[in-house]
Image: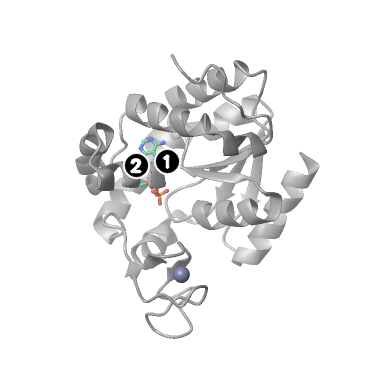
Amino acid sequence: MDGAQTPVTAPVLILLGPPGAGKGTQARMLEEQFGLVQLSTGDLLRSAVAAGTEAGQAADAVMKAGGLVSDEIVIAVLTDRLADADCAKGVVLDGFPRTTAQAEALDEMLARSGQTITAAISLEVDDVKMVRRVAGRFTCGDCGEGYHEDFKPTKKPGVCDACGSTSMTHRADDNAKTAMSRLDAYHVKTAPLIEYYEQKAALRRVDAMGSIDRIGQDIAQIVRGA
Ligand code: ADP
Ligand code: ZN
């Protein structure tokens, strides 16, 4: 088992919430504000798919169908990334853990370097609205800035506000049908983690139906107090 010398020293934040809750947006804000490293297993898996690695090949169809990639693959991908030197600054996990087995694996990984989770922040949203949120979103292919057709359009159509690029990308799994499957997977496999972290007294709930900035402020307050 590698990852024994995982260099993470602090803090370790987890963002929990259904697809579309804003985990990626808030993780990017935390990265800028607190100098943390955003670790998105969704991004890591999409890179693996694009690179055609063995893990990527195994994950591709499952992701397109809106299911969960196997714990074995996801834990391996995350463990690998967590061992990189930059993660010593502290990390914000976005989309991991998503199952109890993943949460237990993370606890073990951290325990090996004498660490525990700083906080598991649950983004509380109105589920029914998540499908539309997911289906309307797109990303700048150059700088990674996230947008939404209704809630956060670019100022000039098709042009990134942040970097001026015109290469916008839309995730293959961001459509209404797949979003429903992802929401189901969330309820069955991931929602129990709320209880898991509540029992460890690590859970913090945030109302995530407000403005992006408001939610960001609430989360920042939790991080400062942690
Ligand atoms: P979202 O949170 O909007 O669903 P992500 O980018 O986090 O988007 O995940 C996209 C897809 O990647 C998921 O639907 C799933 O197939 C896969 N995935 C990401 N993280 C995990 C994980 N921790 N365990 C299993 N599958 C995952
Ligand atoms: Zn851009």
Indicate the position of residue 191 as horizontal and vertical percent values. Answer: 47, 37
- Where the C terminus falls, by quadrant? top right
Instruction: Tell me the tag on residue 207.
Output: none
- Where the N terminus falls, by quadrant? top left
Query: For residue 203, which quarter of the picture?
Result: top right
Ligand 1 image-quadrant field: top left
Choose between 8 and 206: the one closer to the eye: 8
Which residue is painted at 35% across and 40% down in the image? 185
Choose between 31 and 85: the one closer to the eye: 85
Q: Does the closest atom of ligand 1 sit within 8 Å of the Cβ of label 1?
A: yes
Q: Amino acid at mark 1?
A: Thr
Which residue is painted at 32% across and 47% down in the image? 46
Q: Which residue is mark 1?
A: 41
Which residue is painted at 48% across and 65% down in the image? 145
Q: Which residue is mark 2?
A: 45
Q: CA distance from mark 2 to mark 1?
A: 6 Å
Q: Amino acid at mark 2?
A: Leu
Vertically, is 163 above or below 5? below
Residue that protrudes farthest toward the front in the picture: 85
Coloration mode = one colour
Q: Residues within 10 Å of mark 2 (few under 14, many from 20)?
A: many
